[in-house]
Image: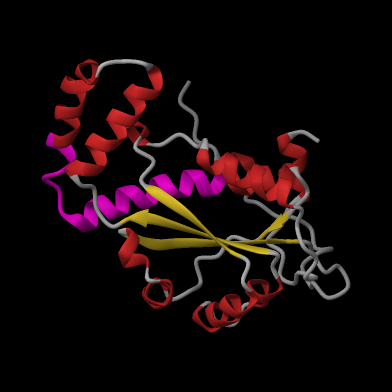
Amino acid sequence: MSLLEALNWRYAVKKMNGQPVEQEKVDKIIAAAHLAPTSSGLQPFKVIVVTNQELKEKIAPIAFNQSQIIDSSHLLIFAAFEDYTEEDIDGFFSYMNAERGLPDSVTDAYKAQLKGMILGRPAQENFNHAARQAYIGFGMALAEAALLKVDATPMEGFNAQALDELLGLDKHGVKSVTLLPLGYRDEANDWLVNLKKVRRPLNEFLIEYK
């Protein structure tokens, strides 16, 4: 199945059947998020995986009792860095250079320029920037799930502050951005399953300068 075929197959499932998703498929979905491109390669987000049913039941009311939270096999939470720190930047570049067998001096000039741009900005601006990077990974995970015929429902409808407090995300220096329940559609009870996928006409969606 091509990516376009997979994207036409997928939809935002409203009712999942509780069937577990094979771990091999979940690993591939997470790998797609992990391999996503990010600004300067900093990868300023984390993916939290929740399979504990009791915890999913605590999360459900935080997400307006959307049933996919409880009925999912795995709940992925994409969480962005609260802010960038000098330690984050230094640590990443040291790790990257070590993995590539390069001395740290190779990236010193670029790293100094990056710090000059990032570290003087307000924390909220840096969080917003990090959240945009998280969404790139989120999109990659969504696409990989579709290619594997795993249903995934994007969710922004939740109380992020309450979720962060429940999971103690401040200890990890991140704040939740979006949710992605993984599972399989309950075709008998999902009102959306047989409805046509509708997008704006392409001529309204696309702006071209030739």
Report the side of 165 relative to 56 (left or right). left
Percent position (x, y) of residue 40?
Answer: 32, 31
**195 versus 161 height, above or below:** above
User: x, y percentage for residue 202?
Assistant: 63, 41
Residue 204 % position (x, y): 57, 44
Query: Which secondary structure dominates the residues rendered in magenta?
Result: helix
Residue situated in front as seen by the camera: 126 or 9: 126
- The vertical placement of 30 against 160, above or below, is above
Left or right? Give the position of 55 relative to 147.
Answer: left
Asked if the magenta segment contains residue 145, the reply would be: no
Res 75 visible: yes
Q: Is residue 204 visible?
A: no
Q: How many marks?
A: 0
Examine the image and state in which quarter residue 203 appears.
Answer: top right
- State left or right for residue 84 relative to residue 21: left
Find out whether residue 122 is within the magenta segment.
yes
Range shown magenta: 116-140
Residue 183 is situated, as x and y percent measured from the top left of the image, at 73, 61
Most foreground residue, 100 or 134: 100
Tell me the residue at 21%/43% (across/down).
87
Q: Quadrant of the N terminus?
A: top right
Q: What is the image's colouring? A: secondary structure
Give 136 or 105, whichever is nearer the viewer: 105
Residue under the point 77% across and 62% down: 20
The single residue placed furthest to the right in the displayed view is 188
Viewed as shown, does residue 155 lie left or right of 151?
Answer: left
Identified at 67% across, 50% down, the residue is 26
Residue drawn at (72%, 37%), measured in percent from left and top? 4
User: Height in image: 28 above or below 53?
Assistant: above
